[in-house]
Each structure stands twice: as structure tokens, then as C-alpha cells.
Image: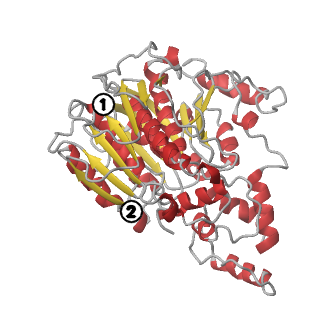
Amino acid sequence: MGQDSRTNTLLTRLTKKKESFKQLFAPGRVCICLGAEFAAKPQGQMIFSFAINLLARLYPIVQDLQIVLPENIPLKARVPRWRAETLDEYIHLFLRKLNPPLKWSVNETLTAPPNCTLAIGSTVQIPDHIIFVGSDGWNVYVSPCDSVEVGDNTNPVGAYSAACFGVAEVSKHLLYLHRELFTGIPIVPLKQSLSFSSFTYHAGSHEPNPPLPPYVNLSRLTVVGLGAGGGAAMFTLASLREIRGIINLIEPDEVVESNLNRYVYADLEDATQRKSKVGIVKGLFEGFTGLNIETFFAPFGEASQHLSPEDYTYVLAAVHSREARRELQYETPMVIWDGAATEDGEFRVWRLVFGTTECMWCKHPPTEADPERQKAEQLALLLGPNIDTWLRKIRNNEAFEAGEIRAMAAHLACENQQFDLPAEGQTYGDWEAQQCGRLPLPDTDDEIPIPSAPVMAGVLLAGEVIKELCFPDAVLDSCYWNTLLGRFMERVQPNRRLPSPNCSFCHDDAYLAQYKRRWDAIR
């Protein structure tokens, strides 16, 4: 399983064909260039470096990445993880550590005509297809026509949102060339300039754009889940100049190579050494002296035994499991943020306040049609031993034990299966990824999002954390969604989702009383 495995699987699912996608997208040559007029600006450096981070993970859609920038520009932005003195040194270090399957080069000039160019600032060459991106503070600018602004108001939320928009437009252009294969999938490249506020989620150039304070005090933030969305949120917060407070990081999983296409904080060395996600993400925050980070390499149910009620003041729930989301709601956090993305390019962010907006039980009611239980039932029928075992594997990515494997082998003694049994110590996620397309199961709840969509959701969730603590009048109320693959909906506004009248949890007097007792004095 290589870095391209999930992208290839996504393309297979979207096209419903087993193509040679390497051959289909060849030469897949993309240029990303940083104009000299913006190269020294921290905002321009963040857009540029984050866009490279995303593009380098897009093989086989992107097969040849040409990076054009001036040499020896001092790195002024705080970009986490791969530390260097100059911007070109940072790019070289990152790409060597990631070691993607694509070809890459870093030069001061273009060396071959690209299929598509992503430009931050002006460009001397005028390729056939070019996308300009820029940002000033919270504001994002994207244009297929003209160079756009990169301002002096430094803010990683706006910068990384701009990078997501730009990379999504590059992806759309390359996919659109083969649109006849993507039946029923809307792929709509941008035709005119777009201004978007990551502060208000409104399109337009006259939105509020307040500067960030000298530091952000995170108070007590608990983060459950460090996949694509949770990891991008932490990468964004770690790009701030100064943060203080307490962060609890909860995640039971390790980094594997097949996940590198969307984990902006991880590289090939992490996957090869099977490093824990919590350990890698903790390292993003090196240098913040006023910040304390606690890590829990465990499922939420185990980690929660070590948390105090105050640790539920602010909770970022970047988990895949519906059961885990409902489990979080039992603790009645003061504020919960949630994010999601789909394989057709949608991204969603939520801010949930118990008793005021919908809760996790409203969003994910426990029904007979629960996709995780459906999958567990199918696996138990196919392999044994029981539904509860498979639910634990799915929700916590548990490793398989020798006794469980023996029971499966006995269950399949007379079967001529086309798939492999797991190995002792192998995690559920690794085993399932290796059996992709070979297990005779329904595809329930197995969506593989396009990488930029969950990353975009994570970046915006980091923005919501910042707004909660620094700009409380501007927080999300209570859901926002849009798309990075179809036509971006400029008129879509955040909307309030009220508690469901049929939700027994929202209207439970005991949990409402617990919420009031814990948080009324703070809110």
C-alpha cells in the first residue's frame, strides 16, 4: 500500500472503472510559482508551502510537480514540523521527507510546459491554464484570470484556505480533461474571480477582516481524532505566532503510508516507523512556552477516564465513528466542533451547543441503519466471531489477536475466499485497506473524500477555535457547507440547526441540568 493507494481507490470509485490512472493523467505536470513581490510575505509563504504540501500528495493526478520560487528567501512564516532558515530549504526538506511517488523539482524558472499552473503573485510565463490564489488575513482570493492580492495581515486560516481552493482548482482542471469518465460527478472549474471570507463564510470583498491578537489563549481544548481534518486543524493552530493554554490530544492510531495523501502533518518516515499520530502532532507545537499538551494514545473511552470536567470546555471532534461522536456528547461539552467531507468534494463544519443547536445525537441517531453496525454485522456473518468484536475493530482501529484470527480461519474452513485474513498485531484499518475491493461487503460508510475537502474543513475548524476565544461575536451558528469539486456556492450562508424534537438526548432533563451546572457561570 503506497501513498497513491487511496487516491487510486477514490478515482476507481468515482469513475467505476479500473483504469491505469498513471497513464490516464500523464504527464500530470503542474507548476506552482511564487512571485518575487510576495515571496518575503509570511502570508504568501504559508499559502505557497501549504499548497505544495497538498499537491505533493496528489499522485497520480499530479505526476510532475515543478516548483518555481526565488532562492534564499528567509522563512518568515511559522510553518510547523519541517524547520528551515529559508523557504526553498523548507520545500526541499519537506519533499525529501515525504518522498512522494511523483517527480519534483525546485528552480527559479520553469523547465517544461505544465498542464496547469498555480500562481501566488505574478508569473513571467503564461501557460495554457493558470489559477491565481492569494489571501489577506481571513480573506481568500482565487482567480482564473488575473493575479490577486497577498496582504500583510498574516493569518494561517486564510492562507491555508486559499491553498485548499487553489489545489482544488488544479485538481478540477486535471479531472475535467477526462470528465466523460466521471459520470454523475459534478466537476466545475472556476470561471470567474472569487473572494471568500474564512471569518464569516460569505463570498465578497467587503467582509470583516480583523487582525489576530498577539497571542491566542486556547484555554482547555480537547481534540478527539487526528486524521485529515483534526490534523489540518492542529497544523493550522500550530502556525500561529503565539498560543497558550492546554491541549488534550486523543487518538489511538498510527500513521500508515496509505493515509499520507491527506495527512498534512506527516511524512514517509512517520509511516515507515509507524509513529503515533498524537506524538507527531504534539511535535508541531514545539517552541510554544505557554502551552501544555497532554497526549492519549488510546480511544476516547479510555482517555476520558483521565480527563476532568474542565477538559470538556472546548472539544474538537474530528472522529469518523458515529458512536464516538455520541459518546462525546455524554460529557455535555460547553462547545463541540465537528467536521466532515465527502468523495464528491463537499466539506462541512459544525459548532454545537447543547440545548441550543442540534447535538451529536440529533446528527447521528442510533438507528438500525447505523453504517458501522451494518458493516460489523456483514463482517461477523462473513468471518465470525461476533458483531461487538467487529464494532470495536471499526471504531477503535484495534489490532487483531491470534485467537480472533484462529476463530476466523475456523469459520472459513470450507470457504474459497478471495481475500486475506488479518495477521496477528495488524490493525483493522491496515487490513481493510489491503483488502480493498476484495471483501464481499456493501460499501456502507466507506467514502474516501478528495484530500483537499477534509483538510479545508480542518482549517476552518481551527478558525472556529480562534473565533470562539478571540472573536466570540463571529462564531459559526451552527453549520456551514460547500463544495471544492462542483460549483462553489457563493450564496450559501451558515445556518442554525435547532435541536431535533425527536431527540431524546437533547431533551433529557438530567443532561440539560448537567450542562447548566457546568457552564452557566462561564457562558
Q: Which residue is mark 1?
A: 43
Task: Estimate the x, y position of residue 56 in percent, counting from the top left.
Answer: 39, 53
At a point 38% along the width and 48% down the height, the residue shown is: 53
The foreground one among 301 and 435 is: 435
Say if residue 79 shows up in the picture.
no
Q: Which residue is mark 2?
A: 268
Task: Estimate the x, y position of residue 343 in percent, counting from the top left.
Answer: 62, 48
- SS class, disc 1: helix
Task: Estimate the x, y position of residue 269 in percent, counting from the top left.
Answer: 36, 64
361 relative position to 134: left or right: right
- SS class, disc 2: helix
Where 346 falls versus 113 (above or below)? above
The type of residue carrying mark 2 is Leu
Q: Which mark is residue 504?
A: none
Say if residue 262 shows up in the picture.
yes
The foreground one among 225 and 221 is: 225
Residue 32 sits in quarter: top left
The type of residue carrying mark 1 is Gln
